[in-house]
Image (tube, coloured by chain):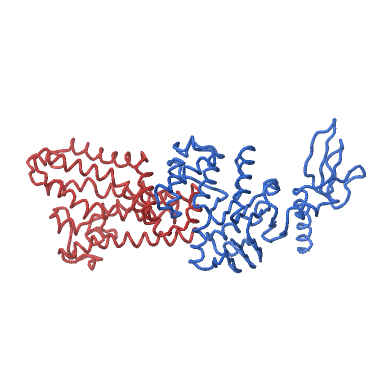
Chain colours: A red, B blue
Amino acid sequence: MTAFAATARYELWMQLRKPAIWIATALPFALYALFAVLGSDSTGLQRYRYETSPKVWMVDALGWFTPVLPMVFGIVLADRLVRDRKLGVAELLDSTPANHSARLVGKYLGACAATAVPVALLYIAVALAFTVWRGQPAALWWGLATFMAIVLPLLLLAGSLSFLGPQLMPTPLFRVLLVALFFWAAATEVESEFPSFAGTVVSLTMDYPLGVFFDSPNATTGPAGVALDFLRPRPTTATAALAVALTLALAAAILAAARALNARTSE
Amino acid sequence: MRLDIVRVTKTFRGKVRALEEVSLTVPGGILGLLGANGAGKTTLMRLLTGLIRPNSGQITIGDHDMATADGRLAVQRVLGYLPQDLGVYPDLTARQFLDYVALLKGLDDRPYRRRRVGELLELVNIADAADRKLRGYSGGMRRRVGIAQALLNDPELLIVDEPTSGLDPEKRIRFRTMLSQLAERRTVLLSTHIVDDVAQTCTELAVLGRGRLIYRGTVSDLTARANGNVWSLVSSSPAPTVGTVVSALPHDGATRYRIVAATRPSTDAQPIVPTLEDGYVLLAQQHSLTAAESAA
């Protein structure tokens, strides 16, 4: 078994047994669900009483999962890399012949996979709920598609930030900044007075794939006549795919920076 | 496996000089590495494991040049290392932790890996607790897990840094015996500040002081150096100020002092047979004196 597979396996195992990942995911979701149940006809679950489209249901459900859950995901993952050094395990593992990059990527994917399990289970539950309610198993397929195209890239990005950030600053400070980043990304509008990446191909609300692939009415895409418009091309399949690719590439670049910094810290 | 360390210097963050021009050869067998805290022992161990690289000098282990990535990898394949501050994953059991380290060491064959982990759990006497989470382990038990992981790949080169700290006397004796047996067919580097561990395990030793190699030779030679410099004095007066008091034991209403000093500390003092600890203390005294003279 390679260093990558061994590390991924054990990291997955350790992280899955951490109660924090279950609590931290369930709590915001439960609050969101509570507000939805108690909400009015226009904001609560009541507005779906005549809904029969599994696509609309699952795309709307994304509002429950982004950006709060990727943010929570990042918060929970923030201790994974730095804890090896805190626990005193890093020196021992670094002295093995296992490739360091393979170990880091294994750790990243193992921890991300484990932390994504509660999110994925909730998402499956939402899809199953619609399937049972409306007798539309296609909700499961739309669930899979939206999870892969929207939720997963955001989770991977949040995970890579959590591998880099705590190496640059104390973990609690990183967690605060991560919350600020996701709130800023979700709260600012294209025409906002604040600098904003809203409605761009690197938006943390994934507007391009949401709008192009899933026809989300909440997605903001295309030139808006404001700053950073070069990041707001005309919405097409290519630009939507580019947005997903850019999110994944950004995650990979941040992870590479985390690896380089980790190697320097080991010296 | 032969170790050649040639004029190695290691400085941290451009200021703290942990090792200075250290040259040392270990042809094989077991070598004790003694030194006070901060003498540079751990830095030397970390250089030999490839965790850090020297600022200057050369380290060759077997045929492998530690300045190259290939050389470091080749050494790490045959290395067993017990770091001074060994940590473990508290949420894994000892068996899982050893399995994980074994995988990282390249023990891919599952039946062999399981058998090997089982053997080592028996060897370090924690088989009964093997499936308990490490969170509940005492310091001594964690140390034994550390010893087991170092032996997983049946290493040709075993580097152990303060291996007996945290072990009770019985486990310490058992570990020392095991270490001597292991040295019959491999190179073992035992770094410690516990002189007795070296006295009971090694015939050869090196002593580091303030980042420099201040002794390389046999245990008996270092012990013999203290001949005529170790004294026993029974006194009810305060401890003598001459030399270093190595021990003070109550004796018939007075105190029996064991003193290492170049000159007789008192007219009542009687010369006695030195131990390795006496030789080490004398060496440290001489080195401090030399360092002070150099500074002056």
Image-based side of B132 in relation to A110, left or right: right
Q: Residue furthest top?
A: B253
Camera-side residue of A68 and A91: A91
A108, above or below A34, in the image: below
**Residue drawn 51% across and 58% down?**
B78
Is residue A72 visible in this depiction of the protein? Answer: no
Q: Measured from the top left, where is residue A198 in percent x and y?
A: 24, 58
Camera-side residue of B131 and B16: B131
The quarter of the picture where the C terminus of chain B appears is bottom right
Image-based side of B63 in relation to A9, left or right: right
Is residue A26 visible in this depiction of the protein? Answer: yes
Q: Residue furthest right?
A: B267
Q: Measured from the top left, where is residue A148 in percent x and y?
A: 22, 53
Camera-side residue of B66 and B114: B114
B63, above or below A206, in the image: below
**Residue drawn 54% across and 61% down?**
B52
